[in-house]
Image (cartoon, rainbow, N blue to C red):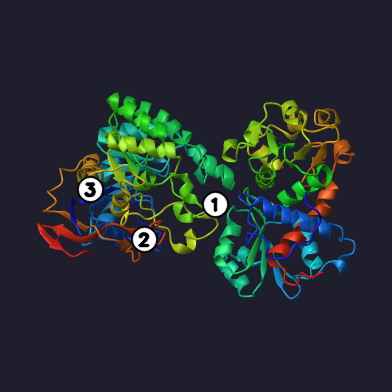
Amino acid sequence: MSELQLPGFVDLAPWFGEPGYEQSETVASGLLSAARGGYVLVAPDPHTKPVIDNDAQVAQLLFRSRGCACGVVAIAAATREGDISEMGLILKSGARIASLGDRLPKDTVLLRSVLEYAAQTGLTIFVHPCDPWLYEKGVVHEGAVAERMGLSGIPAIAEEIALGKLLPLVRLTGARVHLSCISSERGAVMVRDAKEQGLNVTADVSFRHLLANESAIGDYDVNQKLFPPLRSEIDRKALWSGVLDGTIDAVASNHRPVAPEEKEREFDRSPAGAIGLETCFAALWSARGKTVPEFTLAQASEWLCHGPRRVLGLPPAPPCDEEGSVWVEEPWTVESLASHSRNCPEFGQELSVHIAALVRGGRRVSVP
Amino acid sequence: MSEAFLHESGCLSIRHLVGLEGVPREDLERIFATAAWLRERLDRVHEIPKSLAGTTVVNMFFENSTRTRLSFETAERGIGASILNFSAAVSSTAKGETLRDTARNIQALGPTVTVVRHASAGVPGFLTRETDAIVLNAGDGAHEHPTQGLLNAFTMMRHLGDLAGRSVAIIGDIRHSRVARSDIWCLGTLGVKVRLYGPTTLLPRDPSAFGPWVSVAKSLDEALEGVDAVMLLRIQHERQSAGLLPSLREYRDAFGIDELRLQRANPGALVLHPGPINRGVEVSSQVADGAQSVILEQVRNGVAIRMAALHLLAGKNTHV
């Protein structure tokens, strides 16, 4: 059994249900999941209920995360009730990121104002670039699988159109923008072009979009119903190219817990999402050389630790013998999970590596 | 089509009838042969063996449907089944019960067969995993309506014989049509070339997803040229309010089938429609009521097909 040592992972915008959806996940259970997945820091998505869109809510989040197994970098929502949120006060309360969530605002004037204000305030804007109109009725990728299964699709062009709208505004305003969960070939190309033009953008991809394509939906498997949706094999290969050539800065878990009673229902009514904090690295490493290209531990460290740290504006990671995780290459069946939810495509599967210990302050400690 | 024959139940390779995609040709032929045997006896129901006597069929209709449910009920009674009817509007679903809980509660009543219609694609497959009953899909979202696909092909075969090498046009809102998808799979297995036509906003975005036997015509004339059958789909009024169609008037003008347009098809080409018809929209009254129309025959054939499917999947005593 060989041992793998990795630095502490950092995840960009996993979603914890607290406040509002505690039956799906709490801050505590989410951070425990993160620790078990080798993460030392996460920046949780603020679109809870109520939305974390002001300094008091940010403080509340940071309070909730105290003493938990993994640290938190706070993100607040970039808008509040249709206006720009109080970004200056949010920054003072400890958040460094403002999120527009999983689609562009319908109002282009608002979008521009958010970017202008964020550029002045110094907050990075996180957004998944999706056209809000083309997103509304779709449940899967608009392609061959959707056609055969009679499901309405979210076309890849929804991402292209959103980037076409967003990137010129980034150029105009000088805002720093992180593009979450790029899912398409054209998306990867446009990110590459934007970087070559010197725009201040970074991007991540969800590990599931590297592992699978639209055919993973199989016989209406709700655990493979994700947002953004799993797209075509052409898109998946383009995302890998983007990860390997550095166009895409980070690999994210896109952790989206959904309580079983909500998830296990009619496919089109089931909320999209899968949990992934505990299985992200293990699933990717297990697939190496099989369904995904070969990659090294150094590359994995870049995608899961160093890249996300740069996106968040954090200092470089400590060496992995000071802070990180230790993994053992032996078969592991995914059974007990820290998450309150069970919407995990890897559940019941055998992966080839599992976490054996955490490294904190130079010492190995047991996994919580 | 092979001769009419009442095949033994259990002779199909499939346990459920969730869709026609991937159903082997041999299974289709057994269903057709059995349906043909039953069709001859629909007016002499006492001659039909009650192969579902002592078994319970639950008709779980989460979507309103009069004609399909009546057709299934007629078929179920014809082969001796006991029937339980579940209608979502007056059921616990309206009170917020989840689909899984509904399925489990129905399962507790011990039905042998569940006939299910639901607005969401994939529900019949869900029920095959959640219950022990044999599941027949009576229409799930825009996915499939397998017995409709079967009765459409069966109707054509009764007039045209072996369908291999024939051409059929499907005209209308194909994108949202479970009937069209079942037709495409069934006809493909039978060796038919299928031409699709309709407003671009209502056509499949990726017709290659189905297979090489499917093509999209560039005009109504091209769609109809030399076909042996024209299958029309109902235009739903809500497509107009969703911004997919300018008006029904426009649809009639550009896509409606009347006697003049029908002449493009082969002489005697059949006209099919799953009903209910929008007279004067997708089809003129003259064509709907004309000599080439087999619309009413489809209804009759539907009872035979559904009886055949129930018998072959769930029947017990098959000796005549």
Q: Nearer the viewer, mark 2 or mark 3?
A: 2
Q: Do pointers 2 and 3 mark residues of a single chain?
A: yes
Residue type highlighted by circle 1: Asp
The earlier-in-sequence mark between 2 and 3 is 2
Please say if B95 is above or below B258.
Answer: below
Residue A119, located in which quarter of the rendered image? top left
Subunit of label 3: A
Q: How many marks?
A: 3
* Residue bearing the label numbered 1: A268
Q: Nearer the viewer, mark 2 or mark 1?
A: 1
Label 2 sits on a secondary structure element that is loop
Residue B285, located in which quarter of the rendered image? top right
Q: Nearer the viewer, mark 1 or mark 3?
A: 1
Q: Is residue B270 left or right of residue B126?
A: right
Q: Where does residue A2 sit, x and y in percent of width and height?
A: 19, 57
Numbered mark located on residue A94 in the image = 3
Label 3 sits on a secondary structure element that is loop
Q: What residue is drawn where x is 15% and y is 43%?
A: A316
Label 1 sits on a secondary structure element that is helix
The earlier-in-sequence mark between 2 and 1 is 2
Q: Where does residue B118 sit, x and y in percent of width and height?
A: 64, 56
Q: Residues within 10 Å of mark 2 (few under 14, many from 20)?
A: many
From mark 1 to mark 3, how far is it between C-alphas? 38 Å
From mark 2 to mark 1, how far is it between C-alphas? 22 Å
Q: Does residue A78 show up?
A: no
Q: Where does residue A6 sit, x and y in percent of width and height?
A: 18, 51
Residue type highlighted by circle 3: Gly
Q: Where does residue A353 sit, x and y in percent of width and height?
A: 27, 57
